[in-house]
Amino acid sequence: MSSVSSTSNSTQSASVTTGNATDVSGLTGSNYSLSLAEAVSTKVQPYLTRADAIMTQINSNKSKVTAYQNMQSLLQALQAASANLSSQATTGSNVFNSRSANLTSSSIIAGGSPSNASALLSASVTAGTNTGSHSVVVNQIASAEEDVSSTINMSSTAALGYSGSFSIGETGKTPVTINVTSSMSLSSIAASINGAQNQTGVSASVVSIDSNHSVLVISGSDTNTPLQFSDGSNILSNLGLYSASNSTINGTVSEGSTTTALGLSGTFSINGGTNGSGTATPVTVTVTSSMSLSDIVSAINNKAKSTLGASTTFAASINASNQLQLTTGTANVVTFSGVTGNVLSGLGVANVSANGAANQVQAAQPASLTVDGVSGITRNTNVVSDVLTGVTLNLTAADPNTQVTLTVAPNVGAAASAVAAFVTAYNNWEKFITQNEATNSDGTAAASAVLFGDSTLRSASLSVDTTITSMVNGMALGDIGVSLNGANNLTINSTTLTSALTDNFNGVFKMFQSTVSSSSTSLQPLGTDYSSFAGSFTMGVTTNAAGGITGVTVNGSPSTAFSISGNTISGVYGSAYSGMSFTFTGPANATTVATLTATQGMANQLYTTANNFGSTLNGAVQNLVTKLQDTDTNLTSQYNTIINQANNYTTFLLQQYASLTTKIASATYTTTVLNQMFAMQTRG
């Protein structure tokens, strides 16, 4: 015999089968009629009818659970969209704290257009940074040291014939000894230097001028970190990379006339010269394009005397080859710093650094900035995050003559995108509401309206609609270009929205987010208000003689709803004021009373509503889902019990009818025999 399925997921009517049992309805006599099918339908069908009713209820509940879960998802999407516009939510981006950095330049390039400020620096701003403008001048970017050898009159792979060793490394790191054999070329020396780069911070490369001329280039990896050398075997000196002492420098460019304007301009500082007391002070010189070699020499000497004193031994001159010559007159090495323009390169003057690098292409130097008129700001790297609070400057080029204006402003684009996302979330919610309010032509609920007339859905819808049509702090959605159309969907006028965010950002902020005001300047809101409190209350703050807070009252009575930490007063978790914080700067040995007023912004209200209804932990919809699922569990148990009873009864009936079938068959046979015997006797 096949039995009834007891699964609760069936959408078909419950039924039982009679298996292979013989239907005895055809075995009839004058006084009886037996039908197995009639017995099953009469005796078992009531069980099946009850099971069908229970299954109908289970399926109805499942449809409601699915609808409620869709409702829950839409509310959570609305909550997430509101979170980005809300101050209450601890999740989301809170776009009203988002900031953008705009760069403009004071310099004008050819054609009358501003120069490209972004070529000098870029900036990023953290959320909540104070808005305003700052001036930035990049005087110098931080650089790593780069030195080059003399031109070697052989290919990069030819053996140099040098033997010995030298050590090299960035200052502050452990130098590594590089061993050189006579068979090594410039390329193999560069490879040895690169093999120790992780330890020394120094890399090397070879520039091939042509097949017979090569130059070795070594570079540091860290800005403002000079290299250090040790050249006991004179290998670096032979390569023209190192000079242990060079108190005299000659330019390599010979001028045909010492009195003709050279067309060179720029500024540089010469280091190594000392005054009469032996104190070394840089000599800073500015050269214009109209100056000749003689003019430059005079300018250097005049500046040296005014800087170092008349007794200084430092001097500039013109040698016999009409080249610039600089000498300290001491053992100090002549070096340069703060180099701008093309003067030194035009005169062929190589920068021999204080560390002995004979031909320094780029000295290790810090970044140098002037910010908001404050000069002398130096940093070791080009990523500067500790000059302006909340602002990180990424320096890419220097131009002492260009002032960049950095404007920190609210991120209007991010706010507009968040409003658009909120509108989309609301419209999706409204589509669900419309679907569940749909009726047929006769006024009955449409098949799609699973939650038709549902009180929880109606309550959530009313709360959401009341919020979006309200006015908060004197503004409504229509003021920012967001309005309801005939289908009760929100639409956006992008032009109006952008204008509102640009011209009245604070007003839009106050419409969406909660605000707290105080009647006393001594008691002011601190940080973001994460509370859901709306209304007014008075707070009294009592201090001792030292100015410490000794007690807080709310509406005139002592209260445990606020905690005290230093001069900060915060709402206790679980209290009506949880999420509020205030800072107190009032007088000592006194009681200060202030009226505090909190207004819940539109996004804050929607966040709270969506959370109260849509939370998967304890929201109103989740409570309904849990209740229906518990009910279905009980109904499924009842269904299975009834089906088991129906199967058991069917089995019983089959057994009874099987027995009757046997008895009837036997009786039929007996009747036949008796009839035959009776007929035989009658014939006899």
Image (spheres, rainbow, N blue to C red):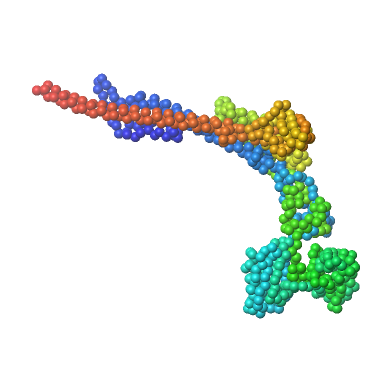
Q: Residue 394 versus residue 43: which sits nearer the camera? A: 394
The image quadrant of residue 366 is bottom right
Residue drawn 67% across the image and 40% down it: 84
Is the residue 254 above or below the residue 470 in the image? Answer: below
In this rendering, the count of numbered labels is: 0
The image quadrant of residue 431 is top right
Residue drawn 80% across the image and 53% down it: 371
Q: Residue 641 versus residue 388: which sits nearer the camera? A: 388
The image quadrant of residue 565 is top right
Residue drawn 25% across the image and 20% down it: 30
Residue furthest to the left in view is 684
Q: Quadrant of the C terminus?
A: top left
Relative to 477, is 284 on the left or the right?
right
Q: Residue 9 versus residue 628: which sits nearer the camera? A: 628
Determine if residue 519 is in view. no
Residue drawn 42% across the image and 26% down it: 50
> Residue 292 location in percent, x, y?
88, 70
> Residue 643 location in percent, x, y?
39, 30
Residue furthest to the front in view is 545
> Residue 134 location in percent, x, y?
79, 50
Q: Quadrant of the N terminus?
A: top left
Determine if residue 284 is in view. yes
> Residue 188 location in percent, x, y?
63, 73
Relative to 630, is 277 on the left or the right?
right
